[in-house]
Amino acid sequence: MTSNATPALSFQSVSKSYGSNHALDGVNFDIAEGEFFGLLGPNGAGKTTLISVLAGLVKATSGKVLVHGHDVRTDFAIARRMIGVVPQELVFDPFFTVREALMIQSGYFGIKKNDAWVDELLENLGLTDKANANMRQLSGGMKRRVLVGQALVHKPPVIVLDEPTAGVDVELRQTLWAFISKLNKQGHTVLLTTHYLEEAEALCGRIAMLQQGRVVALNSTSELLKAAASNVLRFKLDGTLPPALAAKARVVGRIVQLPANTAAEVESYLAAVREAGLVAEDVEVRKADLEDVFLEVMNKNKESV
Amino acid sequence: MNTAMTHTKNGWQSLFYKEILRFWKVFGQTVTAPVLTSVMYLLIFHHVLEGHVKVYDTVSYTAFLVPGLVMMSVLQNSFANASSSMVQSKMMGNLVFLLVTPLNHWDWFFAYVGAAVVRGLCVGFGVFIVTIWFAELHFAAPLWIVIFAIMGAAMLGCLGLIAGLWADKFDQMSVFQNFLIMPLTFLSGVFYSIHSLPSFWQTLSHFNPFFYMIDGFRYGFFGKSDVSPWVSFGVVFIALAIVSSIAVHLLRIGYKIRS
């Protein structure tokens, strides 16, 4: 095993351009061995491109990516043995059964007798009774489980999950996170991209936020939460929010959320609502969560990037 | 962390096995159907031309036709295996399962071309077994039969791989197939000896490497051919070296598969 001093993943000034479009612009950060790391960002921020560079699907225009010290371009055979990538797209090979797909994938990594681990994967992913079913017969959620299994057939020290829970049911999410957390506790490094910020907050010890191909925030989850507004005033409203509040508020349907760190701020917001002739319902003050942090970071950097 | 697994360097075998399993699972479509097509050719040409056309003095037209049909099946199916597998994987997105593995361009090359050779030989053998009952065949030089069958299948496997890498969709693939592979196959002497052609077409045929594959293959049966088997071997060997080099180069640079 590689020494602890060597990062599990090291992104060094990684840039990728498609003509004049800079999908990645000098991305620089390391992920230590054993970390559960979140990579967040809006659609088109460059998350999948960065993972594709890591997986060898896309060639970086400049910079390099190391997996346990091995360059993914020049030392790809070793680097790729050390990572397992769950792709975002729900892809499958319609010719094979679930077990065949997993055994073939094992074979690509040069592992011939892998039945015990494949059985364990099938069990942990709730696929045992589908082992001999053709991939075409599986539901979308089941296909997603097989994708996870295929990424793990070679027990990679680094697991990369690109939006693995997009469009899947609660049961699969719970099964998947229980299994991935177990692997993380055993020492596997996990890199996760997701749009479900609750998941990222619950699972990731450290988070990087990407915006327009640049890292705009990088810290431990707890530090990111501390740095944000610590409290949020939340209420429901029928009617249009007064302009003075609308500029600060996050509005989803009837739900209005405003950063409020003091009682005076809470009072002034509610007074403004009352003066506009509106009634705030289900009023509550809650702790800021990762979604608040994310939006704050994205808004702050919108003009600077 | 107790995650170490034993890795060997023969991952290409798994890809080779997968490519064979892929066509074997749809045997009716990939082997039986082309055998049936060849039998239909034989029945029609045997019925229409037997007794009217004599290519070599001691060889009946049907006997002359059988090796041509066998080789045509070998070539077409080798091409089809590599090309359809690659383009399907690209279109369905499941090529990603291969792209993230430690397999290098040589692994890909030997697995795809190897499986294409196996499919071509399976179909060729099937055509041979079915058509052999229609004509009396000899095996004047069996080694040439094996050599030209394998080299021809490998060459078309390479071309299939190149076409599969180049094409983004099936209609682009059919352009390659209809405007290159089919004309070269049909103008190669499957159904006739090039000596029966006008001189212009005879000369043109000598620039077609498919002609040398079929002529050399036929020599293995009858001990007779339009050109020396050694010349055919030389031409096919050089053609194979060229298309292999192109296929390996495209795989090495990740042409249209790694952006």
Image: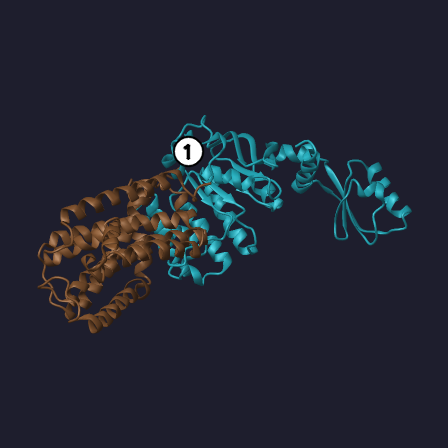
A12 or B126: nearer the viewer? B126
Q: Residue B95: percent from the left, percent from the top?
A: 41, 49
Furthest residue toward bottom = B47
Regarding mark 1 in the picture, which secondary structure is present there? loop
Does A69 sit above or below residue A166? Answer: above
The residue at the point 16 percent across, 46 percent down is B231
Chain in brown on the image = B
A244 or B70: nearer the viewer? B70
* Whether residue A116 is visible: no
Give the colour in which the image draws chain A: cyan
Furthest residue toward front = B199
Type of amino acid under label 1: Arg
Give the image's coloring scheme: by chain
Q: Residue A40: percent from the left, percent from the top?
A: 59, 40
- The quarter of the rendered structure image containing the N terminus of chain B is top left
Does A300 sit above or below residue B109? Answer: above
Does A24 sit above or below residue A273? Answer: above
The 10 Å Cα crowd at callout 1, few under 14, some 14 to 19, many 20 or more, is: some
From the viewer's perspective, tell me whether residue B61 is left or right of residue B164: left
B66 or A231: nearer the viewer? B66
Numbered marks: total? 1
* Whether residue A42 is visible: yes
From the viewer's perspective, tell me whether residue B97 is left or right of residue B55: right
From the viewer's perspective, tell me whether residue A207 is left or right of residue B135: right
The residue at the point 72 percent across, 36 percent down is A230
Q: Residue A248: percent from the left, percent from the top?
A: 78, 40
Q: Residue A100: percent from the left, percent from the top?
A: 35, 55
Q: Chain of mark 1?
A: A
Q: Which residue is mark 1?
A: A73
